[in-house]
Structure formats: structure tokens, C-alpha cells
């Protein structure tokens, strides 16, 4: 499974607050119906997949409720419900929908959870999570992407998503601890700050490995002073940047 998705890192902080995603903007009914039809066909295909089969009903409902076409450039909206990543500018992509669903399912999000996302990118993953948890805190290194994602999320009424442009290696310490952390770029090692911001019993899903090579997607659970780690899928993500920088 290959994925290209936002890298994260440093600098400027921009915080915007958004409630669970709802409808926003005006779109012709015929277009809405076509998008909904294609989205349902895409999500239904997830139950037939081998490596990334999606069976969690809450995750399926969240994927059906999240309009992926609202997070891609206008000229690519016709391809929004194909199961593949698409470019969103700044050498980044919106993630493959089946992998978004799989990572969300593996995270086992609960209704009262507070989740940290490292890598806002287009905002699509945050929007999916917004249907499943109490609050999402999402960090993105590329300021224009952070601003664009914030705009898309607020237009959809995602009031429980909080975004920031900054260094993902450092996490979001003032909002910690988190019940779950999801990382959509690949560090060469698990960032200690993120482990420190995970609550006892919390879960983290993160790809780890070298740039331009196949990496491993890991699921971590925090058990006292121990981190239980399990490899679940080979993936390919863009590298996580900003390691040596400080906001």
C-alpha cells in the first residue's frame, strides 16, 4: 500500500476552532446526488478489500458522511471518489480513502476521545475523525495547507476540529494528554514528545521508516512505562520534517 501525505514540522502557529461536521455551502442537487452515489460505492468497496477491510460501522458511517470532494482542488473533484491519493499542492496529497478508513478503524476512536493528528494536509482525515470523537487537534507544517484545511473544515461546520501550523515532532503539549494520536507522515523513529502526550492506555498509529522506502505502519498502546508496539501494514509516506526545529 502506497501513500503520499503531508509532512510536518515547524514555525508559525495558527489556531482555529471548529463542532461535528455538517453541511456547508451551496451545491446543485444533481451534483450532490452524484457525489453521494460515488462516495457510497467507494465505501461499500472497502468491505471487499483484503489487507485493509473495513468492518467498523461507525467508521463506515463517518466515511459516508465526509465529502472528500470538498478537500481536493476543483479540477480534481471528478476523481475524488477513486480509491487513490490525489495532489493538493505543495508536493503533498490527500490520502487514499481506504487507508484513511483503515487507520481510523485501527485507532478505535471513541465518542469521548480527544485525538491528536500530526499532519492536517487537506483536512480530510480530521473531518472523518470529527464524526467519531469529542475533539480533534491537528497540526500541519505547511502554512498554506493549514489555512486551506481550516477553511474547508469551517465551511463544513466542523466545530470540534482545532488546527495549528507548527512542528509535529513537538505535538500539542498544552492540549495533552490525548486518548489517541494519528500520524500521517513517517519519522525515522517514534517522536518521544508524542509518546509523552499519550494518556495511559492511549493508542497511536504511526508509519515509521526511511524516506523513499517502504515503511511499517505501527499501532502503539501505552501501558505504564511500556509501549506495546505492533506492525500492521507496509506503507509509503512522505517523511516527517521539523525534528530539529522549535516553534
Image (tube, rainbow, N blue to C red):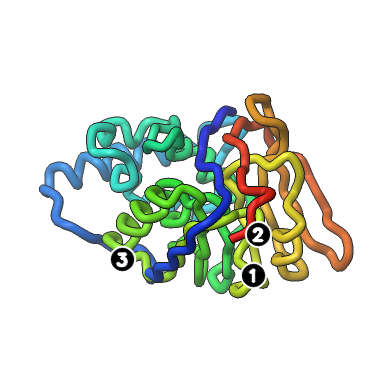
Check the image and report above or below for 62 versus 178.
Answer: above
Mark in front: 3 vs 1: 1
Q: Nearer the viewer, residue 47 or 182?
A: 182
Outermost residue to the top: 213
Label 1: which secondary element: helix
> Which residue is under mark 2?
170
> Which residue is under mark 1?
173
Q: Nearer the viewer, residue 126 or 146?
A: 146
Q: Which of the 4 image quarters holds residue 18?
A: bottom left
Label 3: which secondary element: loop
Residue 195 seen in this snapshot: yes
> Which residue is under mark 3?
157
Whichever of callouts 3 and 1 sits on the residue coming sooner in the sequence is 3
Whichever of callouts 2 and 3 sits on the residue coming sooner in the sequence is 3
Q: Write the residue at 63% across / 32% down.
A: 235
**Decide: marks 2, 1 in contact (CB < 8 A)?**
yes
Amino acid at each position: 500500500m502506497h501513500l503520499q501525505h503531508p509532512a510536518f514540522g515547524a514555525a508559525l502557529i495558527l489556531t482555529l476552532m471548529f463542532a461535528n461536521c455538517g453541511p456547508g455551502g451551496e451545491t446543485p442537487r444533481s451534483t450532490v446526488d452524484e457525489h453521494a452515489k460515488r462516495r457510497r460505492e467507494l465505501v461499500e468497496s472497502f468491505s471487499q478489500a483484503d489487507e485493509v477491510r473495513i468492518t467498523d460501522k461507525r467508521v463506515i458511517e463517518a466515511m459516508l458522511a465526509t465529502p472528500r470532494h470538498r478537500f481536493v482542488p476543483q479540477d480534481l473533484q471528478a476523481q475524488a471518489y477513486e480509491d487513490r491519493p490525489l495532489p493538493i499542492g505543495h508536493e503533498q496529497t490527500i490520502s487514499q480513502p481506504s487507508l484513511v478508513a483503515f487507520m481510523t478503524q485501527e485507532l478505535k476512536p471513541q465518542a469521548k476521545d480527544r485525538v491528536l493528528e500530526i499532519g492536517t494536509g487537506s483536512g480530510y482525515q480530521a473531518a472523518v475523525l470529527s464524526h467519531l470523537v469529542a475533539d480533534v487537534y491537528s497540526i500541519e507544517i505547511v502554512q498554506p495547507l493549514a489555512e486551506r484545511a481550516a477553511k474547508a473544515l469551517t465551511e463544513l461546520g466542523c466545530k470540534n476540529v482545532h488546527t495549528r501550523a507548527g512542528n509535529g515532532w513537538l505535538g500539542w503539549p498544552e492540549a495533552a494528554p490525548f486518548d489517541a494520536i494519528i500520524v500521517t507522515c513517517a519519522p525515522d523513529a517514534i517522536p518521544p514528545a508524542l509518546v509523552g502526550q499519550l494518556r495511559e492506555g492511549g493508542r497511536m498509529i504511526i508509519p515509521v521508516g526511511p524516506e523513499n522506502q517502504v515503511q511499517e505502519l505501527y499501532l502503539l498502546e501505552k501501558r505504564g512505562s511500556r509501549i506495546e508496539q505492533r506492525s500492521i501494514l507496509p506503507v509509503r509516506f512522505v517523511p516527517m520534517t521539523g525534528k530539529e526545529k522549535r516553534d
